[in-house]
Image: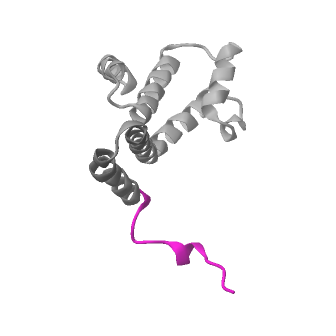
Amino acid sequence: MKQDTEADVQSDVSADELLRAVKQFLRESAIPALSGRDQFNARVAANVLGIIEREQALRPELTMLDQDAAEKWLPRGAAEQDVGVEIARALANRQIATDELFVNYLKARQLLVTAINNPRYPSRMIAERRWRNSVDGG
């Protein structure tokens, strides 16, 4: 029996398109037809799909930001770990100076993480307005 290779199982439909289609079905068809707990759970499912969609779009930028931070503030090899966790450990152990450059990294990271998790959160919008210049180097 033939084993499927990656080329054999690729589709013309992207993961983003599939996520959007399921999210659209939930919001336009399922949620209006449901009530009570089932409607609530369908809304949660649609929101989860939105988080996954945003994470796929923003993950490369977050990964680049973290890799740059790892090169600046972590010992060699630490970048192979979860950079966010390793940065937090180094910060807790006072191995990182909390200078303006490091604070700007934390701001940029937080803006990306909240853009994934809850981009419409009011405090995120306020932080973005206040931080954008320092994060972008302006």
Identity of the residue furthest to the bottom in this view: 1
Residue at 41 percent of width and 47 percent of height:
53
74 on left or right of 131: right
Pick whichever, 85 or 76, lies toward us. 85
**Is residue 67 among what the camera can see?**
yes
Q: Is residue 47 magenta?
A: no
- Where 23 sits versus 43, above or below? below
**In terms of image quadrants, where is residue 93?**
top right
Pick whichever, 38 or 71, lies toward us. 38
Residue at 49 percent of width and 20 percent of height:
101
Q: Position of residue 105 (x, y in %)?
A: 49, 25
92 on left or right of 132: right
Q: Position of residue 60 (x, y in %)?
A: 48, 45
Residue at 71 percent of width and 30 percent of height:
75
Magenta highlight range: 1-15
What is the magenta segment's predominant secondary structure? loop
